[in-house]
Image (cartoon, rainbow, N blue to C red):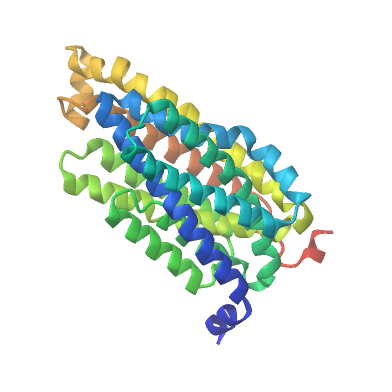
Amino acid sequence: MKHHSFFSTARTFLVLWSGTTISSLGSAMTSFALLLWAYQQHGTATSGTLMAFFTYGPSVLVSFMAGTVVEKLDKRRVLLVTSAIATAGTVALLAIPGAGALRVWILYALNLVMAVVSAFRAPAVNVVTSVLVPPQHYPRASGLQSLADALRTMAAPVLATMVYAIGGLAVTVRQPSRGRADVALLACAVSFAVGDTLMGVGRTPAVWVAGMLGSYLPLPLLNAHLTTIMRTIIPIPMQARVFSARDTLQFSTIPVGLLLAGPLADCVFEPMMRGHTWLSSFLSVVVGTGPGSGMAVMFVITAVVGTVASLVAWWRVRGGARSDPPDRPDELA
């Protein structure tokens, strides 16, 4: 049976996957707790997004360099060292409040260290996965990595994480079909169209939960197909730097968005929706009124822009000669 062959031929990968998933889960839960603490201390969107910026920003700055460095090092040692540092950082964050030394600048510094560690660990994991897993099982390995991404969001609402995890597990068990680029782009469009729209127009917790489900559910398909495409066409000696370059481009928008989201919500969209203009009156029909309506407008704008961009990219791929990479390296010639 195909399913059994994967688990029997990729045992070392499964051990690695389990260890890195547990380590990154602890880091993610800690970062989420710090974000909540920052928001509770100051009560503004900017305070929370600034803490999140120090989680993502340093990683973006060093990711590209990290890939080149990792290529020259023993990947196993990189994984051991980064996991040890991440564990030490988590322990330090747990010990600081008990010592009465909880300060914002200390949390920023620890978040910076954890982000840099993550930037070095990610390319090492990707390269080791390509070595340990037979090429025919790349899609299933990518599905498991999507499952790990879901588990790293455990600090977020549990229900959304469970659905995301089920999606990642489904990709692992079921071999993804051809048309991977098509599926990835359509999954991205669905995530924007369903998730951000419901988060914007919803006015009850039930609708917001449905929006989070709609946002998370397509992501394992997007991540698994994208990673499979890259792992198939990129030679293993180059994968560390290429995956790092991808992460740099992909995540560079996060700190920028975090720095912009807080001030835009506090200083632009929330005051706009408190006003009495024709625009606020029109938008209130869609997103409602009162506190939070300005942030709801931001969700709706994100939904429209993200969905349109994803569908345009999908249409361009559909118009190309082929939407998949070749299945064999010798087909690349």
| Left or right: 151 in relation to 143 | left
For residue 241, above or below residue 303: below
For residue 79, above or below residue 131: above
Q: Residue at x 65, y 50 (%)?
A: 320
Q: Residue at x 56, y 53 (%)?
A: 84
Toward the viewer: 108 or 314?
Answer: 108
Which quarter of the figure has residue 247?
top right
Quarter of the picture containing the N terminus is bottom right
For residue 175, above or below residue 202: below
* Residue 93 picture location, percent across and down: 41, 42
For residue 213, above or below residue 202: below
Q: Residue at x 52, y 63 (%)?
A: 19
Toward the viewer: 108 or 270?
Answer: 108
* Residue 267 picture location, percent across and down: 31, 15
Is residue 77 visible in the rendered image? The answer is yes
Which quarter of the figure has residue 292?
top left
Q: Residue furthest bottom?
A: 1
| Left or right: 254 in relation to 206 | right
